[in-house]
Image: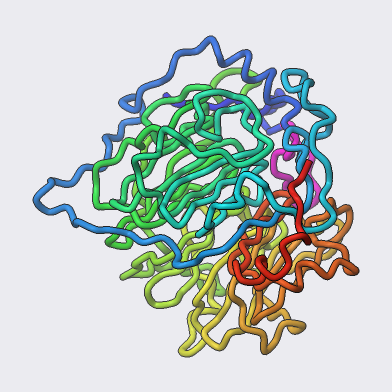
Amino acid sequence: MPRKKVTEVSGNGGANKKRAGVKRKERDLSSDDEFEYEQENNKKPGKPAAKSGLQPVTVADDVKEKIKLEFPKVKGQLLIFGATNWDLIGRKEVPKQQAAYRNLGQNLWGPHRYGCLNNVQVSCVVSGPCAAHSLLITTEGKLWSWGRNDKGQLGHGDTKRLEAPKLIEALADNVIVAASCGRNHTLALTEDGSVYSFGENKLGQLGQGNQTDAVLSPALISYNGQPLVKVACGAEFSMVVDCKGNLYSFGCPEYGQLGHNSDGKFIARAQRIEFDCELIPRRVAIFIEKSKDGQIMPVPNVVVRDVACGGNHTLVLDSQKRVFSWGFGGYGRLGHTEQKDEMVPRLVKLFDFPGRGATQIYTGYQCSFAVNEMGGLFFWGVTNTSRESTMYPKAVQDLCGWKIRSLACGKSSIIIAADDSTISWGPSPTFGELVRPDNKIIFKYKVLNIPPGLVHELPVTSLSQEQEHPQECTAPT
């Protein structure tokens, strides 16, 4: 059975974890213990999907839809600011295996530009709220990657860290239209609805039917159903959506984040708790609504249109503009006025009223956002755990009247492209991802797209502005 070692248990069978009320703490972003666990599990062979009792989703070719997806019709240039010491981000110290990079990379307090991209037109940039690596998609559908790479999450067939974007040669013959970054893994979606995955796989988050420490080069996930149209990555799990609006998940089931009505937890033997991981895409079969008195009712006719993942939770937007959330409930990030974990997608009631449905959804590591039909931005969860949590969606009054075009939230910092402006805020400490208030360069660019990064930001800006001010951004060192 696919398993994951998580924690030791006390003699009475209770998990030996520290808790503060009901606010359970997710596993630290630090990877200090990652390599000890890796050495233990490197000796174990990959485990086949047959042990999970599930077979890959399969649809006959004569009933399978034929689609051709398009990437965003954006032409711009990439700017970067924030932390760039990729092996230190989210960690207390650089692991011994990456000691050579200990002093490589710096905090960029203003917008910079990569020289290798001077003649590259960028369509989309991708990172994640718990990721220390990044991707970009060109207007020709080519995928580039750079950043941390100790699990092969850059897709270049090795574990060498990259300081600047590099084309993923293994995908050069494919047209990539979308991608997503987890903590140490990556998903890439092609124009025909196929998904490639690479990076860490010891929890099955690559969906390739086994558990191995890492997959260094892109490989197709174990799926032969309807073409896929959306991909999203949590820290150690993944979500995909097919062209019929069905949602599938795979990876670590901790906190119920896969949506299969279980956290997969069991005591394997004395002093050890493990999880039964999903190694191949499994359909999320039920969506629910809970009444105030606790009555649970299924919600029918859910056709998924968008999906977004935080570190350990997920948001879904359906065709009726309803929002569902599930996974880890700490700090109110699910928006249900309580901190309980949700094992299946649960309706967020605020957006289930006529004229108040959601049109956009976003997630940070411990928080969630939605834009409703009237253009209002709503927030719930927390960006600073030392402050009070927002337990249900509340309007961000300071942005009332602004048209939100793009939003990114990392561990604690938030940056928004609204109207023709760029707005950022967040608690300390920061590493340059908010841009200094006296830095005027960013305000001379129209930001087209912003992906979330752990403590770095990667806005895509218009080309025309760059031509007027070619000397204002230089390549990072």
Q: Main secondary structure of the magenta part?
A: loop
Q: Which residue is drawn at the image coordinates 21% and 42% (left, top)?
A: 58
Residue 441, above or below 146: below
Q: Residue 173 location, x and y as percent?
A: 34, 40
Residue nearest the viewer, comparing 386 with 165: 165
User: Can residue 263 be seen at all in this image of the molecule?
Assistant: no
Q: Residue 182 location, x and y as percent?
A: 57, 43
Which quadrant of the rendered structure holds the C terminus? top right
303 part of magenta stretch: no
Residue nearest the viewer, comparing 369 with 265: 369
Left or right: 363 with respect to 87? left
To which quarter of the image does residue 428 belong? bottom right
Residues rendered magenta in the picture: 16-30
Residue 144, above or below 346: above
User: Can residue 281 be seen at all in this image of the molecule?
Assistant: yes
Which quadrant of the rendered structure holds the N terminus? top left
Left or right: 36 with respect to 192? right
